[in-house]
Image: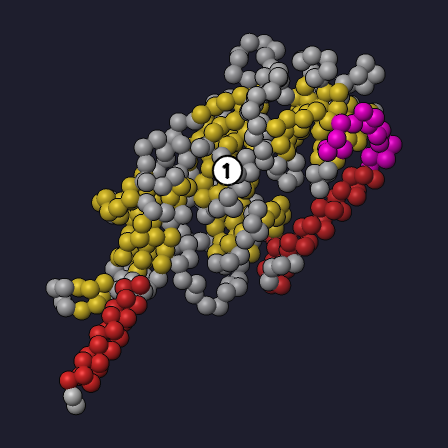
Amino acid sequence: MNRITITIIATIALILLATIVVISLARGYQIDFTKKEFSSTGILVATSDPDGAEVLINGKLKTATNNTINLPPGIYKVKIVKDGFTPWEKEITIKKEEVFKTNAFLFPSVPDLRPMTLTGAINPASSPDNFRIAFGVASASAEKNGIWIVDTGRIISGGSIFSGADFRQIYQDTAGLSLSQSKLIWSPDSREIIASVGANLTVLLQTDRNNDQPIFVTNNIKTIFSEWNEQTIVKNKAQTNKLQPGLQALLATTSANVRFSPDETKILYQATASASLPPILTTYLPGSNPTLQTRQLVSGKNYVYDIKEDRNYLINDSVVWFPSSRHLLSSSNSQISIMEYDGTNKALIYAGPFKSGFVLSWPNWSKIVILTSLNNLPGAQENLYTVNLR
């Protein structure tokens, strides 16, 4: 064997060795110089929004987000903190050659409250698609009184009686018909609104235009609501049909108030009977949420089921989905909180007066909308305010 052949073989061997080392490091292995061997590890991908937060593992500062950390297999307490934001923490299990991602969304610890409306917002109602709010105005100039819609998917500057969002009037009150005090109900497709003044006057409004001549529907309101209810049933059935047949049957017989997350990867529901949730996945899914789950359903309790990971979590609060699909919004007793979908990392984002029953999330997660009056004087108007999260 000549020298050139030996050099070629040695070069190939070095390339193969380097390739093996690179692949091993990518799979989470580390070089242990004391033992002179590769040690098997897992990878923690520490991400946060906003980024630049500190990452503490078992109480010790390790790095800043966004970063990756190789850890020997074991159980770790991971905490992510940033000044001005509520901390995120979770106990996780690191397994060899597996990747766990934190996806920590940090919420401000001091609320930033700003008015959306300046002349009152009467009976606000959010659209089913969560992109618009309808409300009445009765205390502005004559041409401004009536029914308004704010598009929460768009932000603009200024406005004569409103500030900081895209507002448009869909009905202007007249001497013959005032709707500013009416109760508002959206259609399932968010294209129409029923405005009711007492029990004897009901009109139908189109949400994409100014309704100079609203349609009076008092005599056939039951038919309209029946059609809307059928639309809702069809939509819910289309979502449910995507589930495993066994899960469909279980939800149909033991649950109520079934609400899919915005991305349709999770289900929020209330158990109506005690039951055992059978396993759907037969194989282990790497990197699954480590939070303890429960598969024994108790009547009256709320749960979140993760469709992709086949994991079920008990939720002790009364909640609705947050637009991220990874969080839940809770409001009660003059407090508004956001928690992760498994019930952990509950963050108080607002404590103060607001009207119960109206708390809305901005579609891009940046704000919470509430209805409140910060003036304690009798007869003070309630206005829409945003609690800014970014």
Measured as percent of width and height from the top left, residue 9 is found at: 21, 82
Residue 234 is covered by the magenta coloring: no
Please indicate whether residue 53 sits to the left or right of residue 312 in the image: left
Identified at 61% across, 38% down, the residue is: 130
Q: Residue furthest bottom?
A: 1
Please indicate whether residue 376 sits to the left or right of residue 40 in the image: right
Crowd around label 1: few <14 · some 14–19 · many ≥20 (10 Å): few
Identified at 50% across, 44% down, the residue is: 324
Q: Is residue 284 above or below residue 347?
A: below
* Residue 193 visible in the snapshot: no
Measured as percent of width and height from the top left, residue 376 is found at: 53, 12
Quadrant where the C terminus sits is: top left
The magenta segment is 206-222
Measured as percent of width and height from the top left, residue 15 is found at: 25, 73
Identified at 14% across, 64% down, the residue is: 33
Identified at 64% across, 54% down, the residue is: 239
* Residue 377 visible in the snapshot: yes
Secondary structure of the residue carrying numbered label 1? loop
Please indicate whether residue 170 sits to the left or right of residue 243 in the image: right
Please indicate whether residue 42 sits to the left or right of residue 153 in the image: left
Residue placed most toward the observer, 12 or 276: 12
Q: Is residue 332 above or below residue 287?
A: above
Q: Residue furthest left?
A: 34
Residue placed most toward the observer, 311 or 8: 8
Residue 221 is covered by the magenta coloring: yes
The amino acid type found where label 1 is placed reads Trp
Q: Is residue 140 above or below residue 28?
A: above
Determine the image quadrant of residue 124. top right
Measured as percent of width and height from the top left, residue 133 is found at: 64, 30
Q: Is residue 166 above or below residue 252?
A: above
Residue that carries the numbered disc 1 in the rendered image: 365
